Image (cartoon, rainbow, N blue to C red):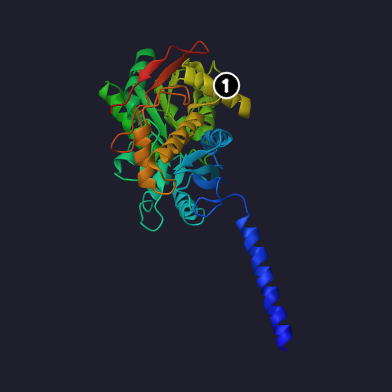
Amino acid sequence: MLRKSKRYVSLLIMVFLVVTVFVSGCGQSAATGQGSSGTAKVVNIGWTGPLSGGAAQFGKDTLDGLNMAVDEINSAGGITVNGQKYTFKVVALDDQYKPDMSATNGRRLATQDKAPVIFVNHAGGTYALQQFNTDSSNPFLLAVHSSDPGVAAHGNKLTFVGADPFTAQPDPYSKQAMQKFGKKLALIPAVTPYGQDWGKAMTSAWTNNGGTVTGTFPMDYNTETDYASYVTKALSTNPDVIFLGGPSQPDGLVIKEARQQGFKGGFILCDQASMEDVAKVVSMTDLNGTIGFMPLSQLSSPGVKKFVAAFEAKYNRVPTFHNSGMYYDMKVIAKGMEKAGSVTDPAKILTGMKQVLPITDDSVPYQLNSINDKGQMIIGLYGTMISNGKYGQPFSITPQQ
């Protein structure tokens, strides 16, 4: 009996030794794991945004930019922090453009995936995540691709905004549209916080320039399919210009419907819409008189050209500003982690990001100068009006610091 017990104990010891050797020999581990010397650990980067519904293409655009940046960083060997190599993995969750789902996704990414950084691409989702991203139990840096000025004004200490506030756009857009078409404006803003804020800013700029708002007709661009009724209501007020407050594809369908109903005036696009994507839905001729961001591919700086060529090679399509947004954000975050000496502390990461700016070489599409005390990175972009079926001359859109 004693001999059998000794054999049993010896067997347990052998099993324990085998398991120990196997575990210690495992290669890659999570950023919070132990990892073997010289082996890169993985840092999860969270993303929540729309991958279904009317804003799905907008969501995919931002996610593609993020994935491209991560692929480039990993292909170059990742980053080195305190002598340890790290690579990145994007964990993306669909929130259908719904703030409550953004919050659910954010909690999962922070607690289960231990993501020190979570990207979100809409104001409603940002406001939802700002309710808990500074909690001491699972803090994370909220990296925002939204131009709604409210996300920075919120005062959240762990929010980084990588897009210019849209408040710089309504005034020059109003002046361009009035000069070409007249002073009567109808608005079809989105029902989202972003859409409503854009509508208010557009109304203020239009009236400050001596114009008249003939009517406002909010629409859920994410779910609505009957664009005709909204267009009919807007056109019944006899506007010279129509403001559209949704993503590219729905905006394009609204423009097509308006032209079919006989509207000859101009359109102003919010910055969620990309001119080049709208042009996939409606002809350039029907887009005459449309004002919005100058397409990225039409700009000539070395950083833009390099990014456009790389994106086209990877995804076989022309990139938009939304593709580039999370791309350069991720590049700054990676540099910030190295500078801060941490891949887990969101406050240190944000401080490191501020310290690595400005970036003036062609490693990012645009020159990135600084992050202000509200966590906002100011870039400076360009607008244009389509005329004779072509993009017109760019005009500067420079937000105040």
Residue 51 found in image quarter: top right
User: Residue visible at 29% across and 40% down?
Assistant: 153
Task: Please state the horizontal and vertical placement of residue 55, each as a whole percent of the image.
Answer: 52, 38
In the image, residue 149 sits, relative to residue 386, either above or below, namely below
Where residue 209 appears, x then y in whole percent?
A: 27, 21
Q: What's under tag 1, amino acid-wise?
A: Ala
Residue 250 percent location from the top left of the image = 52, 32
Classify residue 21 by image quadrant: bottom right
Quarter of the image for the N terminus: give it.
bottom right
Front-lying residue, 270 or 378: 378
Q: Nearer the viewer, residue 357 or 263?
A: 357
Observer able to see residue 117: yes
Q: Nearer the viewer, residue 230 or 122?
A: 122
Q: Is residue 365 above or below residue 104?
A: above
Would you say 64 lies left or right of 4 here?
Answer: left
Q: Quadrant of the C terminus?
A: top left
Secondary element type, mark 1: helix
From the top left corner, tell me how far across and down residue 147 is, in percent.
38, 34
Q: Residues within 10 Å of mark 1 (few under 14, many from 20)?
A: some
Could you tell me which residue is drawn at 46 percent across and 16 percent down?
A: 301
The residue that disc 1 covers is: 309
Can the viewer see residue 190?
no
Viewer-proximal residue among 139 and 229: 139
- Numbered circles on residues, count: 1
